[in-house]
Image: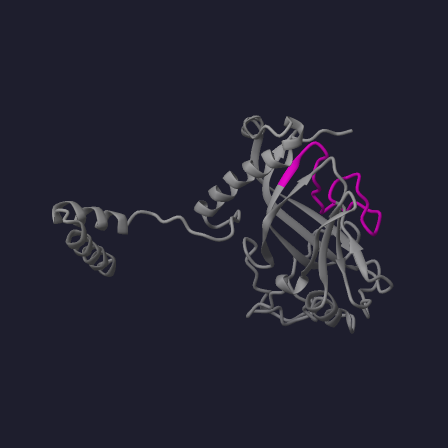
């Protein structure tokens, strides 16, 4: 605070000497200016822990919705903005899952309920995008989980392969190496590639505190994996991607090699995609 005031006074003195203005005018103005909020440059993210960046992300999402439907208004940006301002907007997220195997090197998520993932299954823990809605994505995360059964809901999402969770020999190593360290994430829409390749390594987070005992063992007071759901495993999405429910999106994880091992059935390793942003309800045209 003191540094800011001193700097403001110095600027006031320089301005006064150059322009001949009164110190009674320049000093108060520069001191006030030193404490005015500055517009920060950088990524507009819907940060779950910062209201200012969330508001910036919200305002930017309205603009993105207007741009996404500009052709429907014959290029009239004013009309498109009015339409975007009339939408029912809210913070939201979608969750898509796919189970891995040891025979494939790419795994596809389903964005809406009519899209097909690599398993041709909609899991009960998924929350896909409605066809009539749109989501302006500001951040997304890629996680792993060990599903004990096809409908199990007791397992945590993880940002790395903990060998005490993924206990089959080779499965944790495949998660940390083949998936997180060398995998790529890509998205295409209507056969147009809009995200060619972004490293899954961006999502890897090996916590300082880790689960140190096999799940279900008799070990007492074993620490759990440290994770903060608002941040860990998520990265920003700039430029924002607008997911429109009426279009066909194909988000894929592409690997350089097969997984060397997976869990013993009925258990399975699932990849989990969570995309967060601003949802616009009833904003699409379903053909």
Residue located at (42% from left, 51% from top): 40
Q: Residue at x 80, y 67 (%)?
A: 259
User: Which residue occupies 18% across, 48% down?
Assistant: 26
Nearest the camera: 219 or 144? Answer: 144
Which is the main secondary structure of the residues drawn in magenta? loop
In-front residue for pair 249/168? 249
Q: Which residues are magenta?
A: 111-135
Q: Is residue 122 magenta?
A: yes
Residue appearing at x 63%, y 32% in the figure: 70
Asked if one can make out residue 147 in the rendered structure from this viewpoint, the answer is no
Give the left or right position of residue 217, taking residue 206 as reference.
right
Give the tally of numbered discs: 0
Identify the image's colour scheme: rainbow, by chain, secondary structure or one colour: one colour
Q: Is residue 146 visible?
A: yes
Residue 278 is situated, as x and y percent measured from the top left of the image, at 58, 40
Image quarter of residue 257: bottom right
The location of residue 44, given as percent across then percent down, is 51, 48
Q: Is residue 6 left or right of residue 164?
A: left
Q: Is residue 251 magenta?
A: no
Which is more toward the observer, 255 or 219? 255
């Amino acid at each position: 605070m003191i540094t800011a005031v001193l700097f403001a006074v110095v600027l006031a003195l320089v301005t006064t000497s150059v322009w001949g203005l009164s110190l009674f005018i320049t000093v108060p103005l520069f001191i006030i200016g030193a404490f005015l909020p500055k517009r920060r440059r950088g990524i507009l993210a819907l940060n779950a822990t910062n209201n200012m960046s969330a508001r910036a992300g919200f305002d930017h999402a309205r603009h993105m919705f207007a741009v996404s439907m500009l052709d429907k208004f014959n290029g009239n940006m004013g009309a498109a903005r009015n339409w975007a301002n009339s939408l029912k907007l809210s913070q939201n997220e979608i969750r898509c899952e796919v189970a891995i195997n040891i025979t494939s090197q790419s795994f596809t998520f389903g964005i809406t309920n009519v899209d097909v993932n690599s398993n041709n299954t909609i899991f009960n823990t998924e929350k896909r995008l409605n066809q009539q809605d749109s989501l302006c994505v500001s951040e997304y995360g890629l996680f792993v989980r060990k599903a004990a059964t096809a409908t199990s809901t007791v397992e945590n999402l993880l940002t790395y392969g903990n060998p005490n969770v993924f206990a089959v020999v080779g499965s944790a190593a495949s998660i940390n190496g083949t998936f997180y360290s060398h995998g790529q994430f890509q998205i295409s829409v209507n056969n147009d590639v809009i995200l060619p390749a972004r490293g899954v390594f961006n999502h890897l987070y090996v916590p300082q505190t880790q689960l140190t005992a096999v799940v279900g063992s008799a070990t007492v007071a074993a620490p759990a994996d440290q994770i903060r759901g608002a941040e860990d495993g998520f990265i920003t999405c700039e430029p924002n991607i607008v997911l429109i429910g009426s279009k066909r999106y194909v988000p894929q994880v592409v690997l350089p090699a097969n997984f060397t091992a997976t869990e013993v059935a009925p258990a399975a390793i699932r990849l989990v995609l969570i995309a967060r942003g601003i949802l616009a309800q009833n904003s699409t045209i379903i053909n």
